[in-house]
Amino acid sequence: MASPHSCRRGVGLMISAIAAFGRFWYRFIVGDDWSIAIAVLVGLGLTYALRRRASVAWWLMPAVVVVVLGVSLYRGRLNRTGSGRL
């Protein structure tokens, strides 16, 4: 029979592992810029909505990726130069 101390340690280890798993996925999906993750989720939702209406929706996610990439690069350039001009 296991002692109460070893059970608590096992539960603590399990919670620690679950927290580490959650942190990994948050960092993997969101990364440094939460706005990109939101844009991808919105794009996926719009693609799903278009597809449900029996429309051709394959073009939407590539368009979202191109726009989000362009905005991200522009914002990165602004942050690097410290000014509003390219």
Image (cartoon, helix red, strand yellow):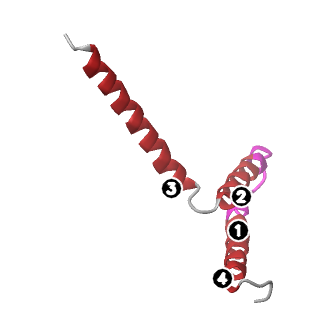
If you read the primary sequence from the N terminus, does the residue marked by circle 1 or circle 2 appear first? 2
Q: Name the residue under label 1.
A: 68
Q: 42 or 63: which is nearer to us?
A: 42
For the C terminus, the quadrant is bottom right
| Label 3–label 2 contact, CB within 8 A | no
Label 2 sits on what residue type? Answer: Ala
Q: Hey, which residue is sitting farthest top in the picture?
A: 1
If you read the primary sequence from the N terminus, does the residue marked by circle 3 or circle 2 appear first? 3
Above or below for 74 versus 56: below
Residues drawn in magenta? 49-61
Mark 4 neighbour class, 10 Å CA radius: few under 14, some 14 to 19, many 20 or more: few
Query: As drawn, is 41 to the left or to the right of 3?
Result: right
If you read the primary sequence from the N terminus, does the residue marked by circle 4 or circle 1 appear first? 1
Label 4 sits on what residue type? Answer: Arg
Question: What is the count of numbered marks?
Answer: 4
x 68%, y 82%: residue: 77
Q: Is mark 3 on a helix, strand or loop?
A: helix
Q: Mark 2 points at which residue?
A: 39
If you read the primary sequence from the N terminus, does the residue marked by circle 2 or circle 4 appear first? 2
Between marks 1 and 2, how big is the CA–CA gap?
Answer: 7 Å
Label 1 sits on what residue type? Answer: Val
Q: Hey, which residue is sitting farthest bottom in the picture?
A: 86
| Label 2–label 4 contact, CB within 8 A | no
x 75%, y 56%: residue: 56
Q: Mark 4 points at which residue?
A: 80
Between marks 4 and 1, how big is the CA–CA gap?
Answer: 18 Å
Q: Mark 3 points at which residue?
A: 28
